[in-house]
Image (cartoon, rainbow, N blue to C red):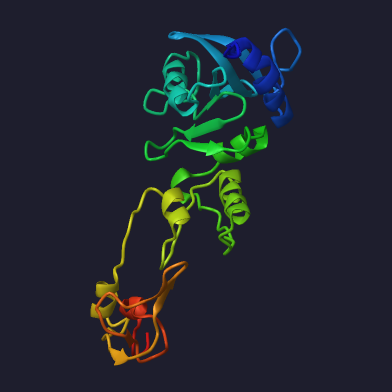
C-alpha cells in the first residue's frame, strides 16, 4: 500500500516554518513581530490569490516564498511566486511588473531562488533561505557590479569528493563560472551553460600551442584486457609513440614540441 502523501500544510509547519525561523524571518502580524524588524507574513492577499509567505525588511516586502508539498517540483513553482509578485499592491518595488526583488519556492527539503531585479538572472537551487542581512546587502548592491565568488575546487574524482565538490558549489549563493582545459564529465554536467570555447586548432593558429605529428615506431607493447590476454593494436601492427612505451591506442594524444 502506497504511503499517504504529506499534505501541504504539514510540509509548511514541519519543514518550511522552522527553516524560515532559523534564517531570521519570524512570523509577524498580531503584534508578535514589530513592523520595523525583519519578519514574514503568511497567506498574504494579492490580486492573484493568497501567497504562502512574504518576507519583509521592515515595511518593505522583499521576497515571496511559494510552498508545496513533498513530491512537487519546487523549481516549477517559481512561476506561481512570480504571479503573486505581480499582484502585490503598495510595494515600492517594480521590476518589470514584479513588486518584490526576490522569489523562492520550496518543498521544505529543496529550495529554489531567483533574483528578479535583472531578467538575465536564472533560478538556482540554494542550501538555505537567506538571512535578512544578506537580502539587505543584495538590495544595496548594484547587480551589474556584483562579482561571483572564486571557489577553490577539489581535484579528486571519488564519489565522496565529487559530492563535497558539488555541495560546496551549491552552498554559496553566487553565479558559478567554470574554466577548464579538459572538462570532465561531472564538470560538464554541472556547468550546463557553455558560453565560450577556445579550441586546440585556434590555439595553434594563434601560436599559443605547437601542433604535433604522430610518429609510429615498432614496439612489443600490447593492449591487455582481463581474461583475453594480449591483444594486437587495431591497426594490425605493433606501434608505440616515440616519446614513451605507451600502447598504440594512446598515439593520438602524443605531442612533440613545447606548448
- Give me the residue at 28% from left, 88% from top: 216
Name the one closer to the observer, 38 or 48: 48
From the top left corner, tell me how far across and down residue 141 is, in percent.
Answer: 53, 43
Which quadrant holds residue 200? bottom left
> Most extreme residue toward the right, as rendered?
32
Q: Where is residue 13 in the image (x, y as percent from the top left)?
A: 68, 15
Nearest the eye: 207 or 117: 207
Position of 197 compared to 78: left or right? left
Q: Which of 28 and 185 is in front in this view?
A: 185
Number of marks present in the image shown: 0
Q: Is residue 166 left or right of residue 179?
A: right
Mark yes or no: residue 177 visible. Answer: no
Q: Where does the N terminus fall, quadrant-wise?
A: top right
Write the residue at 44% across / 62% down: 179
Q: In this view, does 237 lie to the left or right of 134?
A: left
Residue 197 in sight from this viewpoint: yes
Question: From the viewer's perspective, is residue 147 above or below residue 126?
Answer: below
Q: Nearer the viewer, residue 184 or 139?
A: 184
Q: In this view, does 200 lie above or below 215?
A: above
Residue 243, image quadrant: bottom left
Q: Which residue is drawn at 46% across and 44% down?
A: 143
| Quarter of the image with the C terminus in it | bottom left
Residue 79 appears left or right of 66: left
Amino acid at each position: 500500500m502506497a504511503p499517504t502523501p504529506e499534505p501541504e500544510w504539514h510540509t509548511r509547519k514541519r519543514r518550511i516554518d522552522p527553516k524560515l525561523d532559523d534564517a531570521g524571518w519570524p512570523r509577524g502580524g498580531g503584534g508578535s513581530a514589530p513592523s520595523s524588524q525583519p519578519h514574514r507574513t503568511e497567506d498574504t492577499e494579492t490580486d492573484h490569490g493568497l501567497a504562502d509567505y512574504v518576507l519583509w525588511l521592515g515595511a518593505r516586502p522583499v521576497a515571496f516564498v511559494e510552498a508545496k508539498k513533498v513530491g512537487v517540483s519546487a523549481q516549477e513553482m517559481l512561476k506561481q511566486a512570480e504571479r503573486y509578485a505581480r499582484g502585490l499592491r503598495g510595494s515600492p518595488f517594480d521590476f518589470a511588473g514584479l513588486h518584490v526583488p526576490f522569489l523562492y519556492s520550496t518543498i521544505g527539503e529543496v529550495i529554489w531562488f531567483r533574483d528578479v531585479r535583472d531578467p538575465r538572472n536564472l533560478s538556482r537551487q540554494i542550501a538555505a533561505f537567506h538571512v535578512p542581512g544578506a537580502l539587505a546587502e543584495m538590495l544595496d548592491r548594484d547587480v551589474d557590479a556584483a562579482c561571483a565568488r572564486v571557489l577553490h575546487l577539489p581535484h579528486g574524482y571519488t564519489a565522496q569528493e565529487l559530492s563535497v565538490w558539488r555541495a560546496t558549489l551549491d552552498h554559496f549563493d553566487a553565479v558559478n563560472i567554470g574554466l577548464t582545459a579538459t572538462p570532465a564529465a561531472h564538470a560538464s554536467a554541472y556547468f550546463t551553460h557553455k558560453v565560450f570555447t577556445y579550441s586546440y586548432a585556434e590555439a595553434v593558429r594563434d601560436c599559443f600551442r605547437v601542433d604535433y605529428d604522430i610518429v609510429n615506431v615498432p614496439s612489443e607493447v600490447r593492449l591487455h584486457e582481463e581474461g583475453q590476454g594480449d591483444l594486437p593494436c587495431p591497426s594490425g601492427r605493433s606501434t608505440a609513440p616515440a616519446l614513451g612505451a605507451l600502447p598504440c591506442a594512446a598515439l593520438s594524444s602524443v605531442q612533440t614540441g613545447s606548448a
